[in-house]
Image (cartoon, grey):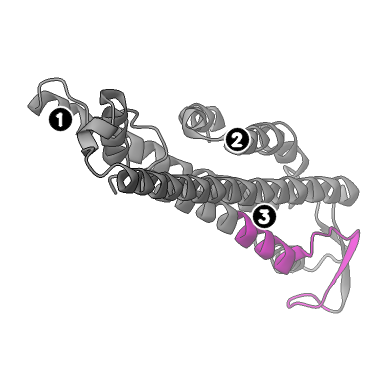
Amino acid sequence: MNWMSLQVLLGGVSQYSTAFGRVWLSVVFVFRILVFVVAIQQVWNDEQKDFICNTLQPGCANVCYDKFFPISHVRLWALQIIFVTCPSLMVVAHVKYREMKDEKYTTLHKGDHLYVNPGKKRGGLWYTYILSLVFKAGFDAGFLYILYFLYHFDMPNVTKCTEEPCPNTVDCYISRPTEKKIFTLFMVVSSSVCIFMCFCEIFYLINNKIRKFLRKRRDRITDSNYRRVDPTASSTQNLSNLEKAKVAAEEKESMPT
């Protein structure tokens, strides 16, 4: 698989991300994809060939290997990286949809724009971004649970097998178990860091949303008190042209699409 093409595709997501999102992308590219391509695939390239059992019974080693390794670590991590990075494409697709919609609106309304900045996280794009973060954290947590359920984040030196057609309890030996355990823990830690960054970004976005809502509410209360003090002043007199343009732009950005 060409992982560099995935990196180029997701590189465009950084321009729509917060600081936490950019850190998440850096961790994924440097500590997960790069380590996976350069080191992990080389460590696990001999996993079945060097899985040796102390018996000459035909088929015993294959059956025991299938029991202890129902899915390869390499393939499991490859699926994890694909599933974790795909939700970011939701944000890119939503921004492209906004840009197409804004282009059509500009054509029909003689230069007026529907969105001041299609990539700004307001309205429906804000919810899409939050949903992508939930999916990313959920996929990472799910794959960590699968890895723990299958292997308990461990790599033993010797495993005992009693499966047929083995004649009795046989000992099977895994190649380079210490090195594989180190890389397993490394991938677990990097996945945990990514989950933590997703939760930090969710908290950051929700906190900003609440602060903006409270600020708008305070401004409405202040404007209402001002109108009570001067009931003869109209809303047009109270707002400057710049303020009215800002209000109109915020209304367009808060559209649910």
Magenta range is: 140-167
User: Counting other residues with Cα less than 10 Å from the Cα at mark 1, is it few (<14), some (14-19), or many (20 or more)?
Assistant: few
Q: Earlier in the sequence, mark 3 or mark 1?
A: 3
Please tell me whether mark 2 sits on a helix, a strand or a loop: helix
Residue at the spot of label 2: 25
Q: Are marks 2 and 1 in contact (CB under 8 Å)?
A: no
Residue 167 image offset from top left, x and y in percent: 82, 78
Q: Is residue 137 above or below residue 14?
A: below
Say which amino acid is labelled 1: Lys
Q: CA distance from mark 2 to mark 1?
A: 32 Å
**Residue beneath the point at 71% across and 36% down:** 31
Q: Secondary structure at mark 1?
A: helix
Residue to which mark 3 is pinned: 72
Say what secondary structure mark 3 lies in: loop
Which residue is drawn at the image coordinates 28% and 45% (left, top)?
Answer: 255
Frontmost of labels 2 and 1 is: 1
Distance of label 3 from label 1 (alpha carbons): 49 Å
* Place of residue 98 in the rendered image (x, y in percent of width and height, measured from the top left): 28, 36
* Image side of residue 10 versus residue 103, left or right: right
Q: How many discs mark residues in the rendered view? A: 3
Q: Amino acid at mark 3?
A: Ser
Q: Position of residue 38 (x, y in %)?
A: 71, 31
Between 183 and 232, the one nearer to me in the picture: 232
Q: Is residue 152 left or right of residue 20?
A: right
- Foreground: disc 2 or disc 3: 2
